[in-house]
Amino acid sequence: MKILRWWLCGLVSVGAPVWLAVSGEWISLFNGRDLEGWVQRGGQAKYRVENGELVGESVPRTPNSFLCTTRVFTNFILELEFKPMRGLNSGVQVRSECFDEPRTVVLAGKTYSIPAGRVHGYQVEIDPSERAWTGGIYDEARRGWLRDLRDNEPARRAFKADAWNTLRIECRGDLLKTWLNGVPAAELRDGVTPAGFIALQVHGVGERTEPLQVRWRNVRLQELP
């Protein structure tokens, strides 16, 4: 088995260590013990570690919540396992951003206003509803759906309810590709955001008071040139 080599390269403003690896080697983004290397942004959903798994739990009357890496990534392969409860929408942000001041961006002639503290960027959907668009690509807080799964029945059928599923996400230049349980899900060429953090979303649930959970494990990443 290849031995992974890790380097501590510094501290970010939140005080969490940032780790780098040689290009081409797999690194673990979640250590299975605590939330070191991650910071929460957006809403007040609860994130914790339980039995070596990262658990996100909904909280009523709070907006979308995101547990974000303290590192920025550009080109990479990201693999992880996830298990959502029915009724809780979730997702995996890649190449995403969040700023302390509000910003305005113009994309394809349309203006988007992004509030201060709002996580935005590419999201790979986790959708346990009957729609079953898990693996589709959504632009959080900007353009909305970029690649849904309405015409990809094999990927829609690949989702396993009440069980662990595997996502593979590749970002190479302006090409983003996703797989769900080994089945090709979505492919997109888009160069709007070439780099950013990775984040795990717990979607807002409005007034619903019953806690809903999504779990993640084996979150690993391979940086590419």
Image: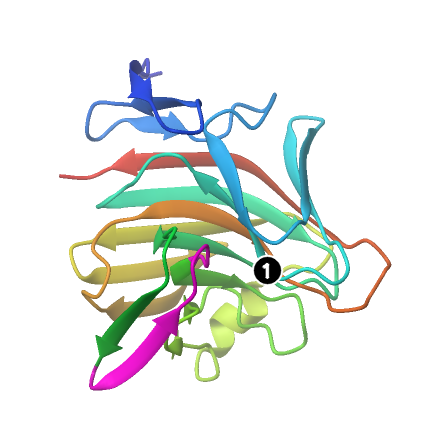
- Give the residue at the far front of this rendering: 101
Occupied quadrant, residue 129: bottom right
**Image height of 16 relative to 215, above or below:** above
Residue at point 69%, 51% (across, down): 163
- Give the residue at the far right of this rendering: 210
Residue at point 27%, 85% (across, down): 110
Camera sees residue 191: yes
Residue that label 1 marks? 64
Which amino acid, mark 1? Asn
**Image height of 128 relative to 131, above or below:** above
Question: Foreground residue, 162 or 208?
Answer: 208
Residues drawn in magenta? 108-119
Total tally of numbered discs in the picture: 1
Give coordinates of residue 33: x percent, y percent.
Answer: 61, 21
Give coordinates of residue 141: x percent, y percent.
Answer: 43, 69
Camera sees residue 183: no
